[in-house]
Image: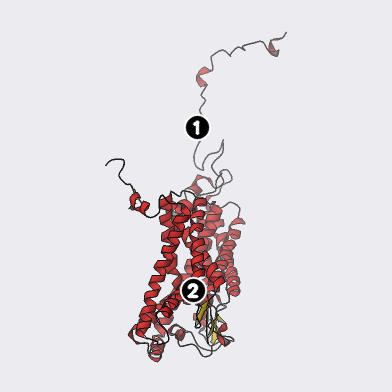
């Protein structure tokens, strides 16, 4: 083929990328990508709104009302609170719905990188800004256009949430298009990389345990689940829409389960609590997921089940501490526990932010307090995961140093051969050798011993009488 043929980049040709924005200024391409991502997401939610309107028609809601409802759903997908007439402020929103705009924006970031030859991380931030700013403006415009006597979305939250979601998702997509995650991680120091890996491992254990607990609760109380469906009697189309709503709320349920395992639990209304030691709940809304909440008064739960549930955060800390040492062992014994505790602090911070978005008000009255307490979850997770990770990292690092350390070589090349490698600067210095080996010294001037010493080129102080 000739040199004019379009090359393949990431499975797509350069000609295809040119049609996606190459040759245009980055800001113009960013506005186009923001409009495309918002338009596709809004179209998908409009289809759902139209299906619901056709299945349960209301004479007082016309096609304009359906379009406003779709716009409100789109804003809810970005976690924008809505003030509903007669009900109050609805702020406990489905986290699963954020996945739709996030995937669309991630794809927009990847296409902009391929179409504008982005190569550095600073350019990635510029790409993210070029999409996030117009996307936030679109979110604000939809918040104003969707207002009605029935529901009104928060304009400040629409601007902030639209910008944050667009910036984060576009930046992730653009960074991944620039280089694989392994190359991006190589830009960080081994210590930082080990703390981030330990945090990811701890979060993975907690999320897996929370998802398992949610699935077991649903399987164990399937009869309660079905009873709520029979009470609502939504019909075929309504049942399908209700099922999609519950799928969107599953990430919230997993985070509630994590708060339950940490100990603080969560509330389903003012003056209520659901915790491993027992639950105190009042009247619950007719929503199938809420029907499987554990019941019982405080102290009525099974002892071994409560102990098993409360042991999960410590298991997450153990996994995090092992990952910290595996990636970056150190000869400074007190450094490993400190990094392990930092892993717990970061885990607690991430869980605190996520649980803050997993709850919120469900109207006025007693339902203004729904979900976990963000600061309690963050504090307890940081202490439980952090202490377990610090102890594990300290013990694992001491064992590793004891196995590989010697006074002559430090950690030596044997440590560098282990997964994660040893510290920089631990290679044997001059005159040192690896344990169990001999060093042979070669004299490069051995053949010149019988040669006369060289004469100085000019007289110096030694030539004076």
- Which residue is labeled 1 in the image? 440
Q: Residue 98, labelled with which disc?
A: none
Instruction: Determine whether the residue tagged by mark 1 lies in a helix, strand or loop.
Output: loop
| The C terminus lies in quadrant | top right
Q: Residue 145, labelled with which disc?
A: 2
Q: Toward the viewer: 436 or 419?
A: 419
Q: Quadrant of residue 237?
A: bottom left
Colouring = secondary structure
**Vertical side of 379 occupied by 59: above or below:** below
Q: How far across and how far down the image is residue 231, in percent?
A: 40, 91
Q: How far across and how far down the image is residue 277, in percent?
A: 55, 83
**Vertical side of 189 occupied by 394: above or below:** below
Label 2, residues with CA under 10 Å away: few <14, some 14-19, many ≥20 = some
Residue 391 in sight in this render = no
Q: How far across and how far down the image is residue 294, in percent?
A: 49, 85
**Vertical side of 411 occupied by 157: above or below:** below
Which residue is at the far left?
Answer: 1
Closer to the chain start, of discs 1 and 2, is: 2
Q: Toward the viewer: 117 or 264?
A: 117
Label 1, residues with CA under 10 Å away: few <14, some 14-19, many ≥20 = few
Q: Quadrant of residue 370?
A: bottom right
Instruction: Determine whether the residue tagged by mark 2 lies in a helix, strand or loop.
Output: helix
Q: CA distance from mark 1 to mark 2?
A: 83 Å
Which residue is at the far right?
Answer: 465
Q: Is residue 122 left or right of residue 48?
A: right
Closer to the camera: disc 1 or disc 2? 2
Q: Toward the viewer: 140 or 367?
A: 140
């Amino acid at each position: 083929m000739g040199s004019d043929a379009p090359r393949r980049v990431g499975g797509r040709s350069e000609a295809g990328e040119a049609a996606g924005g190459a040759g245009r200024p980055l800001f113009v391409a960013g506005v186009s990508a923001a409009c495309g991502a918002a338009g596709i997401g809004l179209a998908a939610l409009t289809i759902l709104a139209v299906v619901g309107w056709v299945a349960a028609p209301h004479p007082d809601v016309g096609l304009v009302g359906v379009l406003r409802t779709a716009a409100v759903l789109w804003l809810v997908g970005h976690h924008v609170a809505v003030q509903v007439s007669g009900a109050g402020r609805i702020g406990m929103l489905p986290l699963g719905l954020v996945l739709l705009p996030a995937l669309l924006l991630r794809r927009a970031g990847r296409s902009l990188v391929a179409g504008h030859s982005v190569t550095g991380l600073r350019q990635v931030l510029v790409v993210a800004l070029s999409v996030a700013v117009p996307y936030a403006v679109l979110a604000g415009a939809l918040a104003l256009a969707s207002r009605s006597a029935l529901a009104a979305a928060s304009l400040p939250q629409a601007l902030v949430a639209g910008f944050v979601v667009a910036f984060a998702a576009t930046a992730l997509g653009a960074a991944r298009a620039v280089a694989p995650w392994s190359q991006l991680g190589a830009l960080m120091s081994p210590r930082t990389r080990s703390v981030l890996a330990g945090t990811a491992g701890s979060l993975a254990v907690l999320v897996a345990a929370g998802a398992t607990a949610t699935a077991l609760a649903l399987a164990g109380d399937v009869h309660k689940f079905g009873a709520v469906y029979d009470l609502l009697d939504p019909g075929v189309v309504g049942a399908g829409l209700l099922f999609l709503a519950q799928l969107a709320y599953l990430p919230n349920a997993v985070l509630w389960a994590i708060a339950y395992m940490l100990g603080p639990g969560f509330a389903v209304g003012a003056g209520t609590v659901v915790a491993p030691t027992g639950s105190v709940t009042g009247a619950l809304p007719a929503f199938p997921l809420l029907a499987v909440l554990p019941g019982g008064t405080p102290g009525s739960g099974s002892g071994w089940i409560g102990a098993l549930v409360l042991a999960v955060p410590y298991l997450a800390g153990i996994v995090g501490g092992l990952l910290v040492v595996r990636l970056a062992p150190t000869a400074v014994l007190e450094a490993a526990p400190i990094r392990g505790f930092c892993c717990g602090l970061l885990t607690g911070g991430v869980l605190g932010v996520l649980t803050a978005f997993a709850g919120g008000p469900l109207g006025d009255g007693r339902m203004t307090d729904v979900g976990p307490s963000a600061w309690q979850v963050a504090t307890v997770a940081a202490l439980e995961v952090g202490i377990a990770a610090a102890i594990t990292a300290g013990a694992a690092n001491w064992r590793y140093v004891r196995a590989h350390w010697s006074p002559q070589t430090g950690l030596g090349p044997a440590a560098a051969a282990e997964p994660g490698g040893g510290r920089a600067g631990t290679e044997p210095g001059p005159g040192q050798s690896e344990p169990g080996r001999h060093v042979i010294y070669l004299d490069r001037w051995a053949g010149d011993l019988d040669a006369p010493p060289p004469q100085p080129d000019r007289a110096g102080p030694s030539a004076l009488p």
